[in-house]
Amino acid sequence: MLDQIDAVLFDLDGTMVDSMGVWVEIDEEYVRNYHLTVPENFHENMEGKSYTETAEYFLEVFPELPKTVEDLKREWYEMSFYKYTHEIPLKEGLREFLIELKKRDIHTGIATSNDRKLVEAALEALEIDNYIDIICTGCEVKKGKPAPDVYLNAAAKLKADPSRCLVFEDVPMGILAGKNAGMKVCAVDDWFSRPQDTKKRNLADYYIRDYFEILNHTFEVL
């Protein structure tokens, strides 16, 4: 999997950390606090959107909310900070995989839809910040996933040819973003996106249940 790869790029939520449950809890709490009615396919329609795009989507769906985009982003950050710095665990085998990448001198980056400050705080709390070379967010490019923008931006910052980049993603929109950027993509198992496994496998080049499968060469080639 790592042959002829100069850079490995990770999504964060559901890919590096088991954090998708945090956002389900936050959404449920937010909806309950403001007595909102959630439409069909609510979470599915948010998939891949940047932090800013998600806030914009909320205001489109719930125009009765007396909030601005910045209000929502600030409230979500406050609601999630403790969980990201004290509760969310790393995916199994990720730390060992990052150590292996460091040994091989393969550059690493994060291309996420999440908030930069939250990502930085989580990486520091999990003690893996020294293994990540750069962070790019969907708010820093024109379009969120499935557009390739955030992955192309990460590759450019690492001065890596997209064709020599390997992406790790847990949802179809993220996998498409990597593929649209001309990169190889490994789908990562996550409980939240498990109902989409068939679609993930059809889109990706590889599939893993945990990062140990890369180290012991038991990953799936699709």
Image: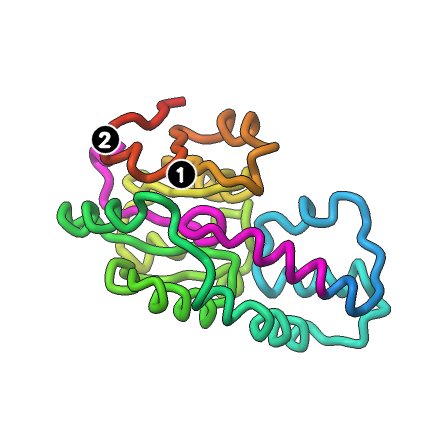
Which of the two discs, 1 and 2, sits closer to the camera? 2
Classify 10 Å Cα crowding around label 2: few (below 14), some (14-19), many (20 and above): few
Seen at 72% across and 75% down, the residue is: 68
Q: Secondary structure at mark 1?
A: loop
Looking at the image, which residue is at 61% across and 32% down?
Answer: 195
Position above or below: 52 against 204: below
Check the picture and name the quadrant holding the C terminus.
top left
Say whether disc 1 or disc 2 marks the residue closer to the N-terminus: 1
Q: Residue 156 location in percent, x, y?
A: 33, 56
Amino acid residing under circle 2: Asn
| Residue 22 drawn in magenta | yes
Is 202 left, or right, of 218 in this rendering?
right
Amino acid at dot 1: Gly
Q: Position of residue 193 (x, y in %)?
A: 57, 39
Tell me what residue is drawn at x 58 percent, y 63 percent.
51
Q: Position of residue 175 (x, y in %)?
A: 48, 39
Residue 78: say if magenta: no
Residue under numbered circle 1: 182
C-alpha distance separating marks 1 and 2: 27 Å
Q: Viewed as shown, does residue 127 lie left or right of 114?
A: left
Q: In this image, 61 relative to 81: left or right?
A: right
Q: Quadrant of residue 58?
A: bottom right
Question: Which label is found at residue 216?
Answer: 2
Q: Which residues are magenta?
A: 1-29
Q: Position of residue 168 (x, y in %)?
A: 39, 42
Count of marks overlaid on the render: 2
Q: Nearer the viewer, residue 34 or 51?
A: 34
Q: Residues within 10 Å of mark 1 (few under 14, many from 20)?
A: some
- Element under disc 2: loop
